[in-house]
């Protein structure tokens, strides 16, 4: 991999200035069928960007390519009036653009999230998880396309400035508004991200994925500065709720492969879904996870779904699915506006898994995601409050 050897100075240290990946072979990723490609505003604004985009487009000779160079990435219209048809069309549409506000600080209210810095080299995701919360968010609802943002070097420059200002090790999370690795075969962004964070004295990368595409990660020097986490659920749950996505077995294998290369590895078991027999299913899967992968932290969460995403889910699965059947209908008007299970059910589910973990690995770090403080207390995790997946 060739890098741009222009330099930038940080705390008296000389670091390589990041650039878009160029000297690599793009590969069509599994689980992403592309029927149309849009070149949105900024996508080919420089020769470097144009070369990068052309190489990826060449992998899809049958896809219709449309130039919309005056249209922002989030204003691409797919001419589908029905929300579900729009959602499905978007999953097969690739958009190249630039995101000027790619590095942000989360502003969660109404739950115990510690808030954190996150950034977006991608937007949305090609996978078909039926509970996906992104499908109902304002940033995705109008134009639910899969996006590659080509201003990656500028994002890393902003991360550098923020870390410098903070003056202490700071996590930057990739996975809040996308899957962190699903498109890496196309972009090779990992070959820029991991070396950047490895070289940086203060910025740290935390990411979340369901992908099994880890080949490029295995060849990179990371110095423990990139923390890799996987979203997992029992295969019995995944078979019902996770379409067009790598199997749980593939994910566990990918986790083991990167762990062997020294990466810190975490798991997020979310959303826990109370299908029939869920107690035995989750107990058995927790044992499988703990005995198979040397994870350093496990974060648990229930469903946290906005109204728009819930409507899409129920269009796909019907009103009687195992998530909707257990939702506390009053939860959407309280707290952070997301629908959740009743607190007693969440407490039972978390306590069951925590007890299984404590029997197998008493010292494993445990946390909850987007939960109320009362749940941290009732599950005995209050001392871990604020030490969940997305932070150091």
Image (cartoon, rainbow, N blue to C red):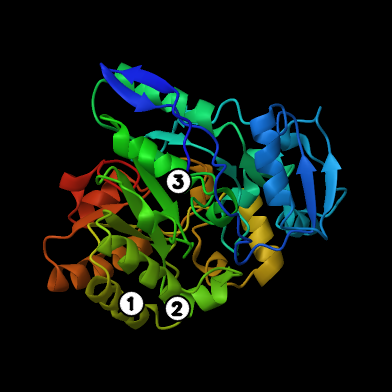
Question: What label does residue 235 carry, if any?
Answer: 2
- Asked whether the viewer can see residue 294, the reply is yes
Q: Decide which of 272, 26 is in the foreground and name it.
A: 26
**Residue 300, horizontal then vertical, whole percent:** 33, 58
Q: Residue furthest left?
A: 362
Whether residue 145 appears in this view of the structure is no
- Label 1 – label 2 distance at C-alpha: 8 Å
CB under 8 Å between callouts 1 and 3?
no
Quarter of the figure with residue 202: top left
In the displayed structure image, the side of residue 246 where residue 260 appears, left or right: left
Circle 3 residue: 191
| Above or below for 372 versus 27 | above
Q: From the image, which quarter does the C terminus lie in?
A: top left
> Badge 1 is on which residue?
285
* Element marked by disc 3: helix
Who's the residue at 25% across and 16% down the image?
Answer: 12
Identify the element where label 2 is drawn: helix
SS category of the residue bearing label 1 = helix
Point out residue 13 in the picture as x, y percentages from the top left corner.
27, 21
Give residue 89's position: percent from left, percent from top.
78, 57
């Amino acid at each position: 991999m060739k890098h741009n050897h222009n330099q930038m100075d940080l705390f008296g240290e000389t670091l390589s200035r990041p650039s878009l990946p160029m000297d690599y072979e793009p590969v069509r990723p599994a689980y992403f069928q592309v029927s149309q490609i849009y070149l949105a505003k900024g996508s080919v604004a420089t020769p470097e960007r144009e070369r990068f985009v052309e190489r990826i487009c060449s992998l899809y000779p049958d896809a219709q390519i449309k130039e919309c160079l005056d249209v922002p990435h989030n204003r691409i219209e797919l001419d589908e009036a029905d929300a579900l048809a729009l959602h499905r069309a978007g999953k097969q549409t690739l958009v190249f653009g630039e995101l000027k506000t790619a590095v942000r600080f989360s502003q969660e209210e109404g739950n115990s999230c510690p808030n954190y810095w996150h950034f977006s080299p991608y937007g949305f995701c090609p996978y078909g998880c039926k509970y996906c919360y992104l499908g109902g968010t304002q940033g995705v609802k109008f134009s639910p396309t899969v996006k590659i943002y080509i201003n990656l070097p500028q994002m890393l420059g902003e991360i550098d400035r923020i870390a410098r200002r903070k003056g202490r090790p700071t996590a930057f999370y990739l996975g809040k508004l996308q899957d962190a690795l699903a498109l890496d075969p196309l972009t090779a962004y990992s070959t820029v991200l991991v070396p950047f964070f490895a070289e940086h004295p203060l910025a740290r990368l935390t990411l979340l994925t369901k992908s099994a595409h880890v080949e490029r990660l295995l060849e990179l020097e990371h110095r423990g500065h990139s923390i890799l986490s996987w979203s997992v659920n029992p295969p019995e749950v995944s078979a019902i709720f996770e379409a067009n996505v790598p199997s749980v077995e593939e994910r566990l294998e990918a986790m083991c492969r990167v762990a062997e290369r020294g990466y810190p590895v975490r798991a997020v078991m979310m959303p826990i879904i109370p299908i029939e027999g869920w107690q035995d299913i989750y107990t058995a899967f927790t044992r499988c996870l703990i005995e198979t992968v040397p994870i350093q932290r496990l974060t648990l969460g229930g469903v946290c779904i906005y109204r728009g995403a819930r409507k899409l889910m129920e269009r796909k699965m019907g009103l009687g699915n195992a998530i909707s059947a257990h939702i506390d209908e009053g939860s959407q008007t309280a707290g952070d506006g997301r629908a959740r299970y009743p607190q007693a059910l969440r407490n039972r589910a978390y306590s069951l898994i925590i007890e299984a973990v404590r029997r197998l690995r008493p010292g494993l770090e445990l946390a909850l995601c987007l939960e109320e403080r009362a749940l941290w207390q009732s599950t005995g995790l209050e001392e871990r409050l604020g030490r969940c997946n997305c932070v150091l």
